[in-house]
Image (cartoon, grey):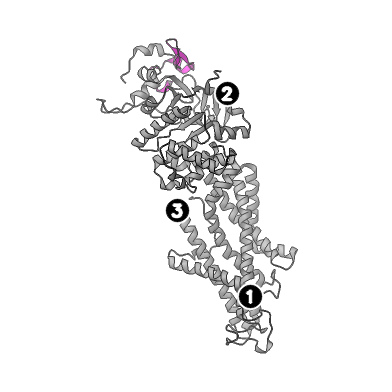
Amino acid sequence: MTTTTLTRRPGLARIRSTRPSLYLLCLGFVALLVVLAIFAPWLAPHDPNAVDLGSALAGPSASHPLGVDSSGRDTLSRLLIGSRTSLLGPLGVVLFSTLAGVAVGAVSGWYGGWLDSLLSRSSELIFAFPGLLLAILVVSIYGDGLIGPVIGLGVAYLPYVSRLTRSLVLAERERPYVAAYRVQGHSGAQICLRHVIPNIAPVVLAQSTINFGYALIDLAGLSFLGLGVPALTPDWGRMVFDGETAIQQGYPLSAILPCGAIVLTVVAFNVVGEHWADRVAKREH
Amino acid sequence: MDPLNTLDIQNLRLRLPNTARPVLAGINLTIRARETVALVGESGSGKTLTARSVLRLLPPGAETEGTVRVNGEDVLAMAPDQLRRLRAGTAAMIFQDPRAAINPLRRVGDFLTEGVRLGGGIRAAEATARAERMLTAVGLTSAALRQYPGELSGGMLQRVMIAAALMGDPKLLLADEPTTALDVTTQAEVVALLGDVRDRFGTGLLFVTHDLGLAAAISDRVYVMYAGLIAETGPADELFAHPRHPYTAALLNSTPRLDSTNKRLAAIDGQPPGLQVQLSGCPFAARCLYATDLCTEQTPTQLPVANNTKHLVACHHTDKWESKVVHV
């Protein structure tokens, strides 16, 4: 286990906590976000795209608890509905990169040889590419819509998972229980799928949870640049972009709120993921 | 080839990549049904690899020569699915450390039944019933089915391991130092259990160990290995009472004894040869007190002792050596 480490981004790696209270708080926040996103259409007080130019840039009031943006759209409704896109995107990225990454990593770790060399070199090639650039490339091919950036980032995050899986599988396949299953007549693929992958799953899951936060930042960055998410779809990154004019006019609330939502969510996912990783590491040693 | 032999290894040679000499340099070994055969030797003598080659569980890049027949079929020439059937049924292995050899995240019941459920084409209920019978046979209760390996003691886990080995109704059990990881009282229980299991299920048993006392207690015949060769083989009582190979005698001499008057434990000088050393002549010559020029020039062949074809010794000087009685 000593050679296996999760891949982290420099700044966010330090956001971790040994205190269970902060972990539980973050876990609760994540759960709350998921519930809000699921029930957003019923919870949102207004149509997120309803334009009321008369009350543009108004502050918080009874009918608009979090104020109105420069186009006169209710900020609370946009935040709630936007949480769906903002969470669904990273979820797609994480699902894609985890499934494909585990498959690639397990194959190269389990079978080794030229296949391992081929897969490892190709994933290193992807690693050399900045994830955002890759996503922009895919968006330019696919055009608008969430699917482009999700696939692009999914591919960009694949090596995070595949490298981790490969090193875990390499360590796991040397353990005596694998040999014990072999001499009971199990085939290699059976042992790998039924025993090795479930046994390494917790570590991979921790990496994927951390990846979720990174993917959220990247996707928000992309929609801030106006790529991927269509203009009218409420999305936190898009809201920060729309809020730029509001800041220039001295009413920063409609831009600061989605920024805060992004930061809090990323930190929460990071703390939860790091906590899981620490717990797995403690168990292994 | 004797058709009665459950296991018949003929002239097995095994070479690993980047080594100067073969790890196994021509092993001949047979086991009949209901027979216990002990394979003893120092670490690195090749005894574990011999046991593993019976199931073709070899390190990557290993090259083999010779034949390993289990129930008359050559393991080294088997097709993959044939090999899987052999591993699932005919031959089973019991590992040294049960705690490492059982997947810690699966219940004991899953561990026992998975092999037969996936390969044997029998239903889950049947497999569970069989697992219960096997657990009872090894002295555990069916309550263990629901438990995780972490909830059982080392001795209990080794019993689970033996039960797992019996699940496929094997003809041959390979026990690779099955008691090394256990404490002494548990060792005695597991050894007794292995003997009991052999009698009840009529299997042949290959017992790999470096514990000579244990080998003497459990086995009908003994093979003494040194540097990839069989130094001496014969019936257990005869071999331990009258060792005819200097290595066997030296091993017996270096066994700690409670009634010994000597303060220091006798040891064999020097180290067993490494795999990077090219050997010529008798592999034990460098450490042998009786070695002559002949020993370093010519590899001794196995010859019967006093016309007893069951007791074979690979030593040039076994006749001279006979007169020098060792104190055992």
User: In this figure, which residue is indicated by the disc labeled 2?
Assistant: B72
The type of residue carrying mark 2 is Gly
Q: Is residue A272 above or below residue B256?
A: below
Q: Which residues are magenta?
A: B285-311
On residue A41, the disc is: 1
Q: Secondary structure at mark 3?
A: helix
Q: Is residue B146 magenta?
A: no
Query: Horizontal and vertical percent for residue A258?
Result: 59, 76
Determine the CA span between mark 2 and mark 1.
72 Å
User: In this figure, which residue is indicated by the disc labeled 3?
Assistant: A283
Q: Chain of mark 3?
A: A
Q: Are marks 3 and 2 in contact (CB under 8 Å)?
A: no
The residue nearer to you, when weighing B239 against B112, is: B112
Residue visible at 56% across and 75% down?
A: A260
Determine the CA span between mark 3 and mark 1.
42 Å
Residue B97 visible in image? no
The type of residue carrying mark 3 is Arg
Same chain, marks 3 and 2? Answer: no
Q: Quadrant of residue B155?
A: top left
Q: Is residue B111 above or below residue B283?
A: below
Residue furthest to the top in view is: B307
Residue B175 visible in image? yes
Query: Horizontal and vertical percent for residue A121?
Result: 64, 49
Same chain, marks 2 and 1? Answer: no
Determine the CA span between mark 3 and mark 2.
47 Å
Q: Is residue A231 above or below residue B173?
A: below
Residue visible at 52% across and 46% down?
A: A172
The type of residue carrying mark 1 is Pro
Q: Chain of mark 1?
A: A
Q: Secondary structure at mark 1?
A: helix
Q: Chain of mark 2?
A: B
Query: Horizontal and vertical percent for residue A72?
Result: 66, 84
